[in-house]
Image: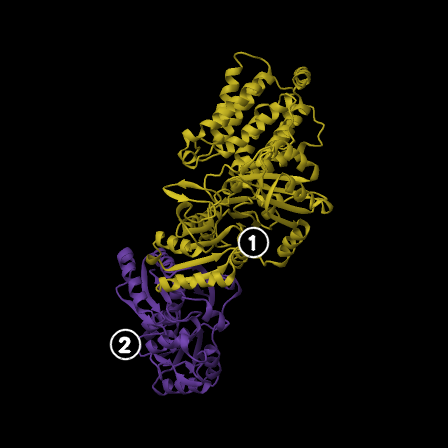
Amino acid sequence: MRLGILTDSTADLPRYLIQQHQIEIVPSILVLDGKEYADGEGISREEFYARLPGFKTHPTTSAPSIGEFTARYQKLFEDGCDHILSIHAAGPLTSILSAAGQASQEFVDRITILDSLSLSLGLGFQVLAAADEMEDGLEAALAAIESTRKRLHVYAALDTMDYLRRSGRLPAPVTFLGGMLNIKPVIELADGEIKAAGAARTTQQADERMLHLAKSAGKLERLAILHTGAERRARGFLNQLMREASQSLPREILMVNVTPVIGAHVGPNGLGLAMVKAK
Amino acid sequence: MRTDTSRIRIEKLRLRPLDGQAVKRLVEAGLTWLKTNQQIVNSLNVFPVPDGDTGTNMMLTMTAAWNEIKDSGEKHAGRMMAVVAKGALMGARGNSGVILSQLWRGFARAIQDTAVLDAQSVVRGFSEARDTAYKGVVKPVEGTILTVAKDTAAAAQAALLETQDPIEILTRCVPAADESVQRTPELLPVLKQAGVVDSGGKGLFFILEGMLRHIQGQPLDAPLASVQPLSSLNFDSAMQGVEEGQDYEVVVDFFPNSSFELRQFYDRLEQMGTSIQVGEGDGMYRMHIHVPLDKRYEPIDYIMGIGTITKVAMENLLAQMDEIDAKARGSKLEFAKVEPGQIAVVVVSPGSGLSRIFASLGVAAIVEGGQTMNPSTQDILNAFENLPTDKVVILPNNKNIVMAANQAREVTVKKVAVVPTRTVPQGLAAMLLFKPDGVLDSVAEKMTKAMNTVQTGEITVATRTVEIDGVKVETGQVIALLDGKLVLSAPAVEAGVLGLLEKANAAEHELVTLFYGEDMNQSEANRIADVVRSKYPALEVELQDGGQPHYQFIISVE
């Protein structure tokens, strides 16, 4: 039995890993000045973040269409897959999962839909874990995901609360942070929910909190430094982390400029961490 | 004539046992005399900043003690003193008030089983009072109220070698306390620099002297015909209690005629009203009084006859009080809901804007207070006793409130951690690390660490002329404090802010938050924020309405 793996572009997987593991990616949709773009088209990530504070109308996003999912599933089956593992961005935060779910109903019992309960490399690392086991079939892939998920931590230090607030994805306990003061929130993405993990007033304070979170995770199996158009900040953070915790870091560390589909909701100049602790 | 009657009275008192009722009268006498001399104690402020007034704090602490016993018919001295100690403990305000309450506590403990005080028990009381007060302070500093308590206890001990009369012991303690107060500048350089004696020590002296004056039949409640430096006049504290029928506050500045006689002046004023204060500076006198509506022109008419009036100010206190009440009601704050088992944060906030900011950061309760109005242990307790959790973090946000917060921790059954924030910016920095669901000690530890990540600047107006740490300051000048240290004086607020930021190395930092006080209008605050922005283009500059009194700006640099 041959297993196919499909995810969406919010997994933020670099191209070489997508190719290496033959993962099918469905692009999510970015809406810029009333025009829809498949994620990765129309505007580069660098340009998007540089322009983000200044767009006339605030960028929005939408899930890929059901038809798009249907076409991708169709293609994988035509390529010889017997079963598809379709794993996606956190259900409580996006409607991608529900679009995939509806599309899958055409292919009874041939598609397993899974909510990653995460975003960006928090989703991406689950996909990679499944891909490592895909030769051994669906059960092995699901077990690998389950194991990864237990050891997964995703944090972000946002430059401002504004974007998240505007997105309507700010849960009540986080709302109070920064009712009046300009706060740079440190958030955790866990179980598909955004939770407050701290607050800072300056980038330096926020980076120190993130460093503390990274260091206290112990030895890591996988690590991605995420940023929203803040490469310098991310590099500085990585250097610091390598100086202070080089023994705990995996051999390969991903540095990812996060997709605009997520960036539109968290704003520019943010720093993120996706970590899978070692077993 | 007077000498004769008072001698008779002394004899009477000596014959009368020092039981619970005698203790009660002594406490009342100490309080009354302290109240009479409150402004003198208040004027002994080291820093020329509007600060928690030691005299007022000690007086309020003593008043709380007195309120507990004023209706008591208790005959047992030890039991009476225990009630005094408890009242003082709960009513303690400011660091000096807290130490004073510890003195009472020690004294009470030493005599708890003593029904009638004798010389031995009085001496034991002074010794235990000293020991308890010293133990209550983490790092005892000499040249303070502690030293005065120590010297007084030593004098009592020495007197015991020569007399078995408890009254005689007290009689010898009072001059010893006085001398000790006079020596405080030798022990504490900052006092010498400021040219004052220690205020807390002086307050303690007045309490003891009041007791002695009572025994000797000398008057206590007549205001002393004293003149204070103009700068130490504090009419705000008088606002806290407007006496029935004394609805108008009248302030008159005047240059007296050559025939001016202070005692006579006071006598006349006493017939007109209450809350009399007289200050003098460069030959000009300022008179402050509360009078009833129909007598509001009397002080002015009177003073016209004895000098040349330069300024008159009259205010309707009731209207002012209404305004204050309305303001308090208007700012309804929404606090974080606390679930049982969660940690609740209680903060002391000196301004309405700052209260709103703290509320938005998730505090569960706010105690209003700060620079010139230090809340009591009881005030702090009241704020959290009714919260539905037993885990509490207190942020005092003022160096003079830390001890009262610690005392609140001692007297409650709840688990309380005091994060000893000395300034508002420290409190805000600590608040960012707050997690309601954490473990109390570790959350408090993280918050304590965080409070030191900011520098605090304060801009205010000097209340007197002084030179401290090489900075020369004249009354009315703008002064800047960096982390509690006087760093510069300036002709205007803008220059003060810029100078302070330079001292704080603002260019090396990321964010400056300016909390403007109630004395600043928003457009002026905005203008100054813009000046800061243009001088430090790389800095993020945030302006917030703090609403604090006396301080034009509280500034956080981080």
Given the current orientation, which residue lies at the most extreme top position?
Answer: B162
Quick check: A63 left or right of B273?
left
Nearest-to-viewer mark from 1 and 2:
1
Quadrant where the C terminus of chain B sits is: bottom left
Quick check: B148 left or right of B250?
left
Q: Residues within 10 Å of mark 2 (few under 14, many from 20)?
A: few
Q: Is residue A122 above or below residue A34?
A: above
Q: Is residue A111 above or below residue A242?
A: below
Instruction: Report, in whole angstroms, how far the alpha carbon at label 1 lies from the one at label 2.
Output: 51 Å
Name the one closer to the observer, A265 or B513. Answer: B513
Q: Is residue A247 visible?
A: no
| Residue for badge 2 | A16
Residue B364 numbered tag: 1
Judging from the image, what is the letter of the chain drawn in purple? A
Q: Could you say which quadrant of the image residue B245 lies in?
A: top right
Given the current orientation, which residue lies at the most extreme front position?
Answer: B258
Q: Could you say which quadrant of the image residue B138 lies in?
A: top left
Q: Is residue B332 above or below residue A87?
A: above
Type of the residue with mark 1: Ala
Q: Could you say which quadrant of the image residue B56 lies in?
A: top right
Judging from the image, what is the letter of the chain drawn in yellow? B
Seen at 53% across and 19% down, the residue is B156
How far across and how far down the image is residue A116, in percent?
43, 71
Type of the residue with mark 2: Tyr
Name the one closer to the observer, B495 or B19. Answer: B495
